[in-house]
Image: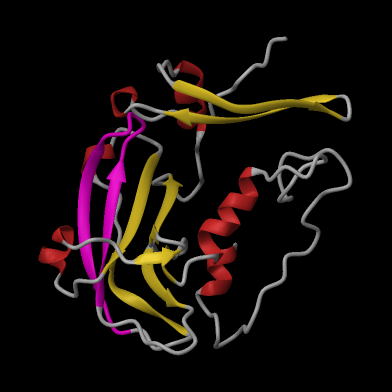
Amino acid sequence: LVEGYQAHLFSWYAAMSIWKTQTPWPSLRGFLYDWWLEPTGAFYGVQAAASDRVHAQLDRGDWGVRVVNKDVAAALPASSVTAEWFGLDGKRVATETMRAPLVAASSSRAADGAVHWPAALSRESVGFLRLTLRASPTPHAAQEVAPLEGGEGEPAASWYWLTPGAAPDYTQLGAARRAQRARLSLRVRSCWHADGHVRAAAELWVPESSGLVLYPQLTLSL
């Protein structure tokens, strides 16, 4: 949704306002924070799309790639976008790179190419795509160049989970989550009691050997 507006940012739109950021009734989607003012997954999704100074994004209509430059003064020189595909096991199965032309300040332009469902995932109904914006305008040298910074020192990278068909089918994603087993490292930074609730701040590490971990659930026992 946010990236759809950004595709025409500064030409059709000058700003975007999100209405009803918190729902007044129980809901599974459509709000950025919950009853206790804790941010939800939607908050981080909007943040990932909207906070970058420069941003590579996917057009969900034709799977084309667009580069957005939100800097109000400086143009973004010609660059490259690296598209990496991952399976449900977290392993990278395909990589392709396309050139992105110079993008003027406060504008966006399409990259020279589109992504395609990889042959390595021909038997899968769900795949993960990462788009990374790099400074090199030469596609074959882009892998050797560090990613551009999108904002706050973070790389200008975007993640998507996709299905190959016209009708989205994410049942395989749910099955993978139910079957996942992994050994994680958890460190509780603080734990306190307030307003009849117990709250904890924790950090979770996923070793590379564990592969992909989807929505881990934590249970606090007192």
Observer able to see residue 214: no
Toward which corner of the image does residue 59 lie, by quadrant?
Answer: bottom left
Residue occupying image coordinates x 89% and y 47%? 24
Quarter of the image that includes the C terminus: top right
User: How many callouts does the rendering have?
Assistant: 0
Give the magenta-colored segment's residue range: 79-102
Observer able to see residue 184: yes
The reply to whether the magenta stretch includes residue 86 is: yes
Residue occupying image coordinates x 80% and y 51%? 22
Q: Classify residue 20 as left or right of residue 16.
A: right
The reply to whether the magenta stretch includes residue 15 is: no
| Colour convention | secondary structure
Q: Classify residue 216 as left or right of residue 197.
A: left
Residue occupying image coordinates x 64% and y 28%? 190
Residue 16 percent coordinates (x, y): 67, 74
Toward which corner of the image does residue 109 lie, by quadrant?
Answer: bottom left
Of residues 202 and 24, the one drawn nearer to the viewer in this rendering:
202
Magenta span main SS = strand
Quarter of the image that includes the N terminus: bottom right
Residue 157 percent coordinates (x, y): 38, 58
| Furthest residue in direction top, as rendered | 222
Residue 88 percent coordinates (x, y): 36, 32
| Furthest residue in direction left, as rendered | 140
Toward which corner of the image does residue 67 lie, by quadrant?
Answer: bottom left
Residue 139 percent coordinates (x, y): 15, 67
Residue 3 drawn above or below residue 196: below
